Amino acid sequence: MNRVAAIDCGTNSIRLLVADGSLVGLSDVHREMRVVRLGEGVDQTGRLAPAAIERTRQALADYAVAIAELGATRIRMVATSASRDADNADEFRAMVQRTLGAEPEVITGLAEAELSFAGAVAGLPGVADPLLVADIGGGSTELVLGSPVATSLRSPLVPRSMLTQPPAGSSVFAAHSMDVGCVRMTERHLRDDPPTAAQVAGAVADIRQALQAATADVPVEQAAAFVGVAGTVTTIAAIALELPAYDAEAIHGSVVDFDRVAEITERLLAMPRSERAALPVMHPGRVDVIGGGALVLRVVMEFVGARQVIASEHDILDGIALSLLTD
């Protein structure tokens, strides 16, 4: 068995997975998530705030200790939307090198999509083919169409005109990364608590515009099933299940109908912060942005015609770990 460490640094959270694995799969040793809000204000300023970089440094310092103590032999850290967009990304990369002893990879949206799909497929066997995966993050959302049968992380993305039959050995057929996420929509539109109807309408228009471009690249009508990954989707699934506390095992693979997603989204957008915070499944770091994330999920499902979403607890973090086993 190889022991590897994967770190996913997004706009809202930074997560660590230490796992034992081989080419047939992963066995978790340790998972951890911290909400550091690295992308706070990036949409307006174009820069990573010093306080946000410091919050991330503190989390990384703890992660470095855990990785050493658990004996991981290989480390890969991927930094996504906020780090792509920031003018001072070099400052962030230098901090990571000092703290972790490894360079962060500031990947493209399409690379992020491929890793997300690989992680979701590896952790969710037995789903239909082809599969549409939506990874709703803090600053971006990836739509990925692919096959759960093959899981190559180096599969080429192919033109829409070639998508009638999947290419041999390929898992990802098409992908698109949109600058739409729970943090970005909250900061850009949903400024009041609760947001006004006009603010919600502005966010919906923004998401729909992004989806027009996304669906020009990704033929969503070919999907046989729709899977949602990351904290927005799993939190909505937990609410739909009426869990007394967050339970990843119960959430993973659960199915939520579109009408239920729409109902939960409406409730979250109408709640003041105190009521959202009191929900037993709500992570404190998601309280301020869950309404924006729920709205992204609802509009995506409506736009692509998905009548239900399958929630997956496995995502880009698992894809990063799997990539260390295939290099």
Image (cartoon, helix red, strand yellow):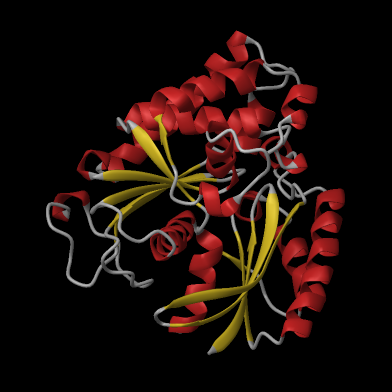
Check the image and report above or below for 23 versus 104: below
User: Relative to 97, is 305 above or below?
Assistant: above
Q: Nearer the viewer, residue 194 or 40?
A: 194
Q: Could you tell me which residue is drawn at 61 percent across and 15 percent down?
A: 199
Furthest toward the left, the residue is 164
Residue at the top extreme? 197
Q: How many marks?
A: 0
Q: Position of residue 317 (x, y in %)?
A: 56, 63
- The image shows residue 238, relative to residue 91, as above or below, that is above
On the picture, is 265 further left or further right than 309? right
Q: Residue at x 27, y 59 (%)?
A: 147
State the residue at coordinates (60%, 85%). Answer: 3
Seen in the image, is 78 located left or right of residue 280? left
Q: Is residue 209 visible?
A: no
Query: Residue 140: where, in percent of width, then height?
Result: 54, 44
| Residue furthest front as drawn | 244
215 horizontally vs 50: left or right = left
Q: Percent from the top left, x then y, of residue 291? A: 62, 27
Please state which of residues 194 and 19 is positioned toward the viewer in this rendering.
Answer: 19
Residue 30 visible in image: yes
168 above or below 163? below
Residue in view at x 73 percent, y 83 percent: 70
Q: Nearer the viewer, residue 231 or 244?
A: 244
Q: Position of residue 10 (x, y in %)?
A: 64, 54
